[in-house]
Amino acid sequence: MNIEHHVRNYKSKISGINAKVAQLKKEITSYKRALKTHVDAFSNRNSLSKLFAGIPYLFRKTSMDNSIEDLSRKLSLAHKDQDDALRVLVLESARELMLNGPDAEKLVRLEQEHAMLIALFDLTEKAAVSGENALNAIQSAITSLSDAESFEVLDAVTDSKLISSVSTIQNFSASDATEQVNQALSDFQQRMSEQQLHWGEIKHSTLIETIDFAMDMMVDSSLIDSLGSLFSLISLSETKNKLIQLHEELEPIVASVTAEKKRESLRLLSHESDLQSLKSNERTKVIPLLRDHGVEVTREFASSITDIYAPSYQS
């Protein structure tokens, strides 16, 4: 095992951090001592002297208070650096211990499964979001088409130039909204293809026991093909009806993707819990090994580590 290497790295790093902590504590003590002297000296002045020295006193006291606060903040960060360095040592040493122990094969398998499940959840979440965006785009287009229809009727029965101008603007808006539907649908279909491709890779793997999940894009392709470039003033009602039909067909598909996202989230959380449990048990076993190398780690500290992976694995 290569625990000695990690211990050397830790001791090299922590020595610099400890020196910084000691220096900061020394500076804070010095400032606090000087501040006390400054406050006591002002308190011993008579009333008239305090009146003339009040502003300079407050100015210097505020400056010293600010310096102490800044140094205390730096000290807090340095203490965090100490904990981070020890945390990394425990993570790296425990991983060495696990990879050379009886659970090595199980560890590798769980980590591979975890990476797959993370990717699947990410793709499913993106598909669900793009599906919702497509539904919103369709609904927006339906509203725009309804508005355009209303003004077209008014334009037909009146001679108002204002109504005519507004009607033209509404038609342009409806055309633009319909084009946005095409773009949203295209994005949704692409996200679904990516999600299904990754799901297929998992199903062909022996790592994860898969569940039955099929996502078929059962939207009539002629509905999509008819939208966009062929949009014209005389087809407002026809286009709106097609969009309404498209929304009805797409809605249960998006609902299925959203439900799958929730299932994948629960599966991922359960898997991470199993992985964390395995690694937490191993991390407590590294305590006596580190103690033999002159590094003290409490069981409470080791148990408090929530990282799933050691930095070297993530890199």
Image (tube, helix red, strand yellow):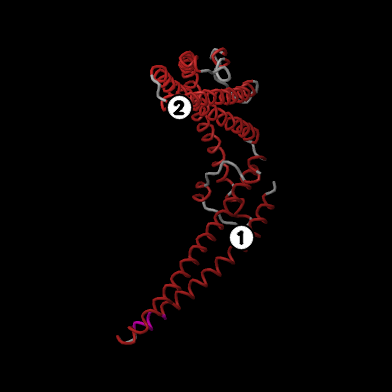
In the rendered view, tell whether residue 241 sits above or below residue 57.
above
Q: Position of residue 122 (x, y in %)?
A: 56, 32
In the rendered view, tell whether residue 73 sits above or below residue 36.
above
Q: Position of residue 211 (x, y in %)?
A: 55, 20
- Which mark's residue is nearer the viewer, 1 or 2? 2
* Residue position marked by numbered label 2 in the rendering: 165
Q: Position of residue 185 (x, y in %)?
A: 55, 23
Q: Residue furthest left?
A: 47
Q: Are discs 1 and 2 less than 8 Å apart at CB?
A: no
At label 2, the amino acid type is: Ser
* Residue position marked by numbered label 1 in the rendering: 14
At label 1, the amino acid type is: Ile
Res 214 seen here: no
Among numbered discs 1 and 2, the one appearing first in the sequence = 1
In the rendered view, tell whether residue 270 sits above or below residue 171.
below
Q: Nearer the viewer, residue 138 or 113?
A: 138
Q: CA distance from mark 1 to mark 2?
A: 74 Å
Secondary structure type for disc 2? helix
Is 147 included in the stretch rendered in magenta? Answer: no
Neighbor class of circle 1 (other Cα within 10 Å; few <14, some 14-19, many 20+) is some
Magenta part mainly helix, strand or loop? helix
Residue 207, quarter of picture = top right
The boundaries of the magenta stretch are 37-43
Q: Nearer the viewer, residue 27 or 281?
A: 27
Secondary structure type for disc 1? helix
In the rendered view, tell whether residue 303 sits above or below residue 102.
below
Q: Position of residue 308 (x, y in %)?
A: 57, 41
- What residue sits 50% from the left and 47% below the top? 304
Quadrant that contains the C terminus: top right
Res 294 seen here: yes
- What residue sits 65% from the left and 54% below the top? 7
- What residue sits 55% from the left and 65% below the top? 21
